Image (cartoon, helix red, strand yellow):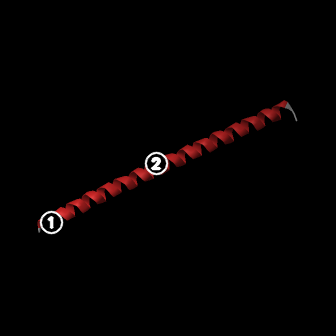
Amino acid sequence: MTLAMFVLIAVLVVLAVITCVFLVALELHRAAATRAMAERRLLETKLELRRLRKELAAK
């Protein structure tokens, strides 16, 4: 193989690694956003439950 082929293979390997790292980072970001949304919904549900309990206790 010539030097040009080795350089081309090295560039392609580097691009593949960068792409994999980017995809992993993107997936981690999406998972964190999903978790934050779920935690927010849980908090809203807890607050609504607390409000309904107070209403029920007042009756």
Count of numbered circles in the view:
2
The residue under the point 16% across, 64% down is: 55
Q: Nearer the viewer, residue 39 or 34?
A: 39
- Left or right of 59 on screen, residue 53: right
Residue lying farthest to the front in this orientation: 57
Of the two numbered discs 2 and 1 in the rendering, the one whose residue sits closer to the viewer: 1
Disc 1 target residue:
57
- Left or right of 58 on screen, residue 20: right
Residue lying farthest to the top in this orientation: 3
The residue under the point 58% across, 42% down is: 22
* Quadrant in the rendering for residue 45: bottom left
Disc 2 target residue:
32
- Left or right of 12 on screen, residue 31: left
Query: Spatial distance from mark 2 to mark 1, Cα to Cα?
Result: 37 Å
Percent position (x, y) of residue 30? 49, 49
The residue under the point 40% across, 50% down is: 36
